[in-house]
Amino acid sequence: MSGPPPSDSAPRVEQQYKPDVPNFMRLGSIPVNYLQKVETDLLEPVIFNDGSGSTVDGFVRFQLTQKGFLHSHSKIFVSLTPVAGVTRAIFPPNIGVGSLVKKAVLKVGNKVLNEISDWDYLHAFHSTKISNENNVERELYTTGRLMNQQFNFEEGTSDPAVGFSVATSRDAVIEDYANNDCLQMPVAVMDGRVPEECPSYAIDLSDLFPFLKVHQLPLYMMDEPVVIELTLRPPTGHRAVRITGTATQPFAIDRNEMKMCFDSVYYGASDEMERYAEANKVLTFPFVDYRAVSTTVSRASLQSETVRNLGMASRLVSKVITMFNNGDRDNEDAVLLGTGSLSPALTDDQPNGFSYNIRYNDKFEFSTNVTNLARLYSLLQRSEQMVFVSRDEYSSQGGGFDGGTDNMFEEISQDEFRGRFFFNSTKLTGGRVGSRGIELHLKSDLHRVVTTLRNYCEYMRSASLEGGRVDVYNL
């Protein structure tokens, strides 16, 4: 057989070889070395309301520019300005500036793509996955988070460490406060007398919406407006930890500092973005969302067998996160602002009693109730890969944070960190949840006043982008 007749001219280079455009939407390594360009815009909120008093929430809305891919590490800048009567205040060291956010919503048109209620409590859980070194070397300056333990040794002796404390690399001197072991770094302190020196921090979009740690949205392919809405905690008592100065004063948001650093990413030197859109006229991607389920409880009610239905019928639930919170969310003198999770009471360094199990699809996740706190901690590590929580922080066992005036953080006893990180996380292995939903079975004697049992169900959703319109549904 004879071949095709010879061409009068050689084909252009782009006609000879056009590689398939990779999936730009999924974060990770790209198999081809593409040119990448990042544009940065500072967006002003289209709606801003700071709230008032200790009961009225604030609200802020940003509308994104529909160009390129939304960079997952775009940030929202926030700064607080206390009144002149507040002479020293800090953000809670476990969640930093995240203490401002009560609810985070990402909308495309009139469809909710991602919505997380009680976001600050979930953020406290996710913040335990940041290492001590990263907290003290980076997060302290970017988000205000600081959970960095150091061992306390007896000065002038070779005795073993007597415990550990939250360290800022700055020890107190007598001119600062008597009997304090460590103080917050000056750059992280708010002083109402010099509001221009109050720190400005950033909230990462991938922290607000965890699915952005895996995906970046192709905004240039969407015809509907993309909006971020944040419900903010009230300005009095909920946003910062007051160390010295007048009590019950508002911490207002500096409107001039409230901006979104919006990064849009472009790939390729020619038409790669257009070819990606042409090859993905129907774009579907799965992602995880979190459903918050809160129940008012008391120490007495939890001492008897408690069964709580979490719902989630007919959904693919991968994980259940459980925490026990107290009523300190509006207490400006509490070092964690009530976002910690309380551990069981101890007698002779042993828990008085704790029983935990999850039932769905007419069977229990564990053949017998989990009563060993060490096993619960192991389940937490297995579910989350790695959490940086000490035994003392988790269950108040093993020693570590010593109370009293010899071991203080600012003017607060570091005993307040003991047993305040008792987070529980369980992966579900039984497949799609049946019509009866998920039941949480537990019994506990908590050693501090508990007011709320809070659960987060991590479940799968899917979004479809076709013709510039987005549809969202549960898997």
Image (cartoon, rainbow, N blue to C red):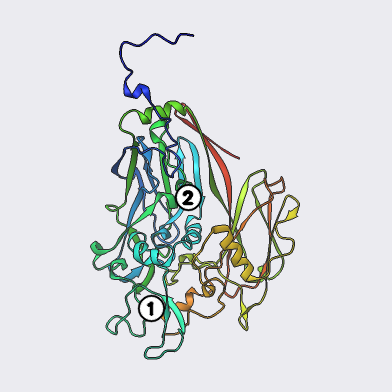
In the image shown, does 16 or 204 lie closer to the viewer?
Answer: 16
Q: Residue furthest right?
A: 362
In the image shown, does 229 or 433 lie closer to the viewer?
Answer: 433
Do residues under tags 1 and 2 come within 8 Å of each other at their CB atoms?
no
Whether 110 is drawn above or below 312: the answer is above
Badge 1, how many Cα within 10 Å: few under 14, some, many 20+? many
Q: Nearer the viewer, mark 1 or mark 2?
A: 2
Image-based side of 160 in relation to 364, left or right = left
Image-based side of 428 in relation to 390, left or right = right
Q: Position of residue 146 (x, y in %)?
A: 39, 67
Q: Position of residue 334 (x, y in %)?
A: 45, 71
Q: Is residue 468 visible?
A: yes
Residue that numbered label 1 is attached to = 411
Q: Is residue 453 visible?
A: no
Numbered label attached to residue 210: 2
- The amino acid type of the residue labelled 2 equals Pro
